[in-house]
Amino acid sequence: MKTISASVLLFCLLATSHAQAIYKTIDSYKLDGTRELKIQLPRNYDPDSERAYPLVITLDGDYLFEPVAGNIDYQAYWEDIPDCIVVGVKQDKTREDDFMYDDTTYFPSEGGANFYEFLSSELIPYIEESYNVSNFKVIIGHDLGANFMNYYLFKDKPLFRAYISLSPDLAPEMINRLQERLSILEQETFYYMATADADIKALRNDILECDAKLKTIQNDKLHYKFDNFDDANHYSLVGRGIPKALNEIFTLYKPINGKEYNEKILTYEGSPYDYLIKKYENIEYFYGFEKQLTENDIRAIAAACKKRDDLEGLEKLAKLVNKEFPKSMLGAYYMGMYYERDGNLRKALLRYKSGLLLEPSQYIDKEMMLEKMYEVQDALDD
């Protein structure tokens, strides 16, 4: 467990240079003692804000916390995934007891049963009381931990919405149980599993068998992804699996890119504006928080409305932007764009002029507003 790949070290450095971990100790009745935690809060976390964040629980936090926290901090910085609260549970001296299961039933027993209850009835309530946590929770485990996290799927209402299983050391019957349970899930659930060509042979064989069975599941509520990495072993696959898993889990959250624009927005049966509203509603439904409208997505929808001559959609977009960013040039710019496309050049000119007194955005500044004013004025003079 001491070997860490270069990619994992990179993300460890990213985590320590940008988002320092908070170290806490929690008293546990279930464990009859204490347990040490590592906690990473999002950059600029405001405890007084109403914003809620997905919670990522990392088992084996003594070595797995840093690569997870580093990846999340890095991808959230570029807005590819949302900011998250990351909690690592230290288990370096207790992991065999924590992950124990019965030799007959193959469900948690003794220390494993205690740790199971600690996580669900003590740790998560403690984090929810201390921080602004959304109802979207992720759990990440490696080998024994990757097997153990599956037991939370068997609750009547699973505790987690996303599971990242890195080279799991699967208990007997777990493959069949997973196939059966994932087939009947009633809430949207993400499940990621990974192995590698140089993984531990016994684990790899079971993982490949498990993958073959999980791929046969017909359940629209299950979002399953599997990776079989080349040139990686039991330890180095961790550094490659974490970013891939996060990318899959938060695909819906990502900014609109060229592929989504061409394949989904331009071919959407309704207005591009309706597509945008649906996308953000889905984000709130899946992840349990509202995503603030981004300028990248505004630009994409505006371009699609123009390409499809959807004036009504462009007007709705401009009004939404003006509502969401009342102090920004954005609202004036897109309302001016709407009037310009509608042929009402005088109103367009007035809108562009009104934007000069407002705050610039990432892409819209005073020079761009002046340029649009000159274009409209020249059109009026012709």
Image (spheres, helix red, strand yellow):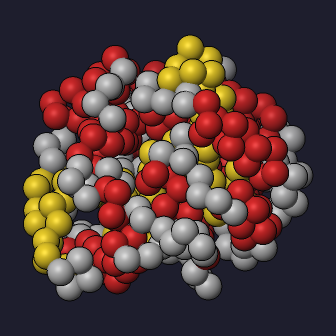
Measuring 59% from the left and 52% from the top, which residue is drawn there?
170
Q: 194 and 371: which one is in front?
A: 194
Q: Quadrant of the C terminus?
A: top right
Task: Tell me if residue 37 can be seen.
Answer: yes
Q: In the picture provided, is 268 more to the left or to the right than 90?
A: right
Quarter of the image where one finds residue 12: top left
The residue under the point 66% across, 29% down is 228
Q: Is residue 152 above or below residue 175?
A: below
The residue furthest top is: 231
336 over 56 or under it: above or below: above
At horizontal 78% and vertical 68% (from top left) the residue drawn is: 180
**Which residue: 45% across, 33% down?**
238
Q: Quadrant of the N terminus?
A: top left
Q: Position of residue 53 (x, y in %)?
A: 36, 62
Q: Residue 339, percent across and down?
A: 63, 45
Total number of numbered labels?
0
- Measuring from the top left, give residue 33's x and y in whole percent: 14, 76
Q: Position of residue 377 (x, y in %)?
A: 53, 27
Q: Nearer the viewer, residue 287 or 195?
A: 195
Between residue 141 and residue 355, name the one nearer to us: 141
**Residue 290 can be seen, yes or no:** no
Q: Is residue 3 left or right of residue 350?
A: left
- Location of residue 35 (image quadrant): bottom left
